Amino acid sequence: MATLLKVDVVSAEASIFSGEAKFVSLPGEAGELGVLPGHTPLISKVRPGTLKIVREDGTEELVFVAGGILEVQPFGVTVLSDTAIRAADLDEAKAEKARQQALEALENAKDKQDIAAVEAELAMLAAQVAAARRLANMKNRH
């Protein structure tokens, strides 16, 4: 039995991560998902949040995903996301500024479709700000 997962994280713009891991966790549609080698096949929506990839040596790669689709096979994990950003590249101030602009856009939204689109954007930006803060807190502890 293999002891590692082949992990691929892809955004609309680029491949964000491709490599092997001993564990992956991420926010699934029904709650937090943890995947180990040998996991039962699964397809799920991914909610905005932090994807954690634990490599064989124990180091972690953190990636912010703004939703998407997850496919799990017994020895492989694929995450397809419109937006995926390496945690090291997250900018809390930039995300917070975008969130404030989205709040202003929400105040000016006229129809239900515009309101729904802005609310979805706000949820993604709030998750991005939270992920950036968690990463900053983790860095400050070390």
Image: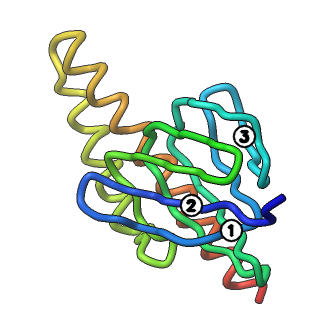
Relative to 132, 3 lies left or right: right
Disc 3: CA contacts within 10 A as few (<14), some (14-19) or many (>=20): few
Q: Earlier in the sequence, mark 2 or mark 1?
A: 2
Q: Relative to 93, say whether 26 is above or below.
A: above
The residue labelled by disc 2 is 7
Mark 2 touches mark 1? (CB < 8 Å): yes
Which residue in the rendered view is the most extreme toward the top? 112
Residue 137, image quadrant: bottom right
Relative to 131, 141 lies left or right: right
Q: Nearer the viewer, residue 127 or 99?
A: 127
Q: Nearer the viewer, residue 107 or 11?
A: 11
At 19% from the left and 20% from the top, the residue drawn is 114
At 61% from the left and 73% from the top, the residue drawn is 61
Residue 105 at what x, y percent from top left? 21, 35
At 24% from the left and 59% from the top, the residue drawn is 13
Mark 1 touches mark 3? (CB < 8 Å): no
